Image (cartoon, helix red, strand yellow):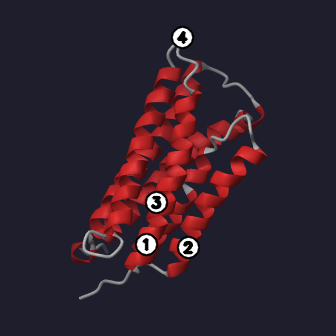
Amino acid sequence: MIRLQDWRIERAAGLVFVVSSLAALPGLMMFWFRDGQSGGQPPTSAYFVWERSFILAAVAITAIGFALLAGALHHSSGRILAIVGATAYLFGGVLLVSAETLQMTPGFDKLYGLVVIYVVTAFLAQAAIGGALLQSRLVAAWIGWATIVWNIAWLIALPALSPRDIYFPILHHVMPLVIGIALLRLRRVP
């Protein structure tokens, strides 16, 4: 039974993060089924639109989760990093949604630079969120450290591992899922 008095902004943020990861899943599976990681083309334009729409919806939902988390950390020592991280992720997300949406339109196929800006911004934003979680002590310290290390490591490694394409959407939804689960498991403090 769901007890509304147990639902605070932290738990709402956790639920939003879990939902964002679930929203990304169909798009990621569609990409994998068409062998997109090896350059496989979508079977139809409608397939491509659905695939990208799931991924873009997940980005938008994740941005909402970070805004909620920043609100939850408003009265903690992590508030500044949380606001910076949430704002940066929103900025990057707007660029990604714009670029991917325009790439579905004939004649707009040279917008990969905006996608790269999203990737860099999203990794840095999530690292800032990890720092905010460490400062606030809202969740276990290992989650804050894991968020920082995961994002900085991929930011550094991706250009070396995949110099032609550094956009792997799944990498941006792993730590929000971990954070979301941790937030949902928080005990209610009287």
- Are the residues flagged by discs 3 and 2 in contact, CB closer than 8 Å? no
Q: Nearer the viewer, mark 4 or mark 2?
A: 2
Q: Quadrant of residue 78?
A: bottom left
Q: Quadrant of the C terminus?
A: bottom left
Which residue type does callout 3 highlight?
Val
Measure the C-alpha gap from mark 3 to mark 2.
Answer: 20 Å
User: Is residue 140 visible from the viewing direction of this image?
Assistant: yes
Q: Earlier in the sequence, mark 2 or mark 1?
A: 1
Which residue type does callout 1 highlight?
Leu
Q: Nearer the viewer, mark 4 or mark 3?
A: 4
Which residue type does callout 4 highlight?
Gly
Q: Earlier in the sequence, mark 4 or mark 1?
A: 4
Residue shown at 41%/69% (left/top)? 132
> For the residue labelled by badge 2, is the local secondary structure a helix, a strand or a loop?
helix
Q: Quadrant of the N terminus?
A: bottom left
User: Badge 3 is on which residue?
Assistant: 18
Measure the C-alpha gap from mark 3 to mark 1.
Answer: 17 Å
Residue 89 place in picture, x, y as percent: 43, 49
User: Badge 1 is on which residue?
Assistant: 133
Residue 171 place in picture, x, y as percent: 61, 52
